[in-house]
């Protein structure tokens, strides 16, 4: 299976671990995690380094953050997750959907960018 590309995961907590598992099992290369907590900067979390989002966004132009570099949001709080997604959409940064191979997704289901379907889910 060829890799869909390199992936940053926005969040560095429990939800991010599950999202990283889905990303890795579907072939993504998880190159890092983003977290607003400066104390986590430079730490290794679940096998990849943590960076503060503003540092990452200042390093890359939207044109550079394109396939094969994408970002998914893996923050448990719904309102924070939505705010982060809107920020990515506004900057035209690619936000893929991730679907665990063990999930069952109806062919009539419509999944938008940033949707993450976990292992064993039925949609």
Image: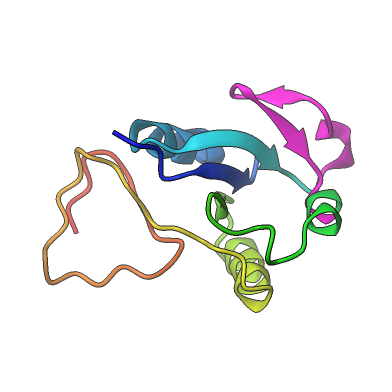
Q: Is residue 33 left or right of residue 27?
A: right
Q: Residue at x 79, y 50 (%)?
A: 56
Q: Indicate whether residue 119 is drawn in magenta.
A: no
Residue 81, image quadrant: bottom right
Find residue 111 and report its horizontal and vertical position in percent. 31, 68
Question: In the rendered view, how is the structure colored?
Answer: rainbow
Residue 39 located within the stretch drawn in magenta? yes
Residue 121 rendering spot, x and y as whole percentages: 22, 47
Compared with 98, 46 (above or below) is: above
Provide the residue span drawn in magenta: 37-54
**60 in relation to 3, above or below:** below
Q: Give left or right: position of 108 versus 61.
A: left
| Residue at screen point 88% across, 34% down | 39
User: Which of these two is toward me, 12 or 7?
Assistant: 7
Instruction: Point out the image quarter for the C terminus.
Output: bottom left
Q: Is residue 107 visible?
A: yes
Task: Give x and y (percent) for residue 118.
Answer: 32, 44
Residue 49 x %, y %: 72, 29
């Amino acid at each position: 299976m060829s890799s869909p590309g390199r992936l940053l995961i926005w969040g560095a907590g429990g939800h991010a671990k599950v999202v990283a598992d889905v990303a890795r099992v579907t072939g993504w290369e998880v190159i890092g995690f983003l977290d607003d907590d400066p104390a986590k900067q430079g730490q290794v979390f679940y096998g990849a380094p943590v960076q503060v989002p503003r540092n990452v966004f200042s390093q890359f132009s939207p044109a550079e953050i394109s396939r094969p570099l994408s970002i998914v949001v893996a923050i448990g709080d719904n309102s924070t997750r939505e705010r982060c997604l809107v920020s990515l959409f506004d900057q035209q940064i690619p936000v893929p959907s991730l679907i665990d191979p063990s999930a069952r997704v109806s062919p009539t289901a419509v999944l938008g960018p940033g949707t993450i379907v976990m292992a064993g889910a039925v949609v």
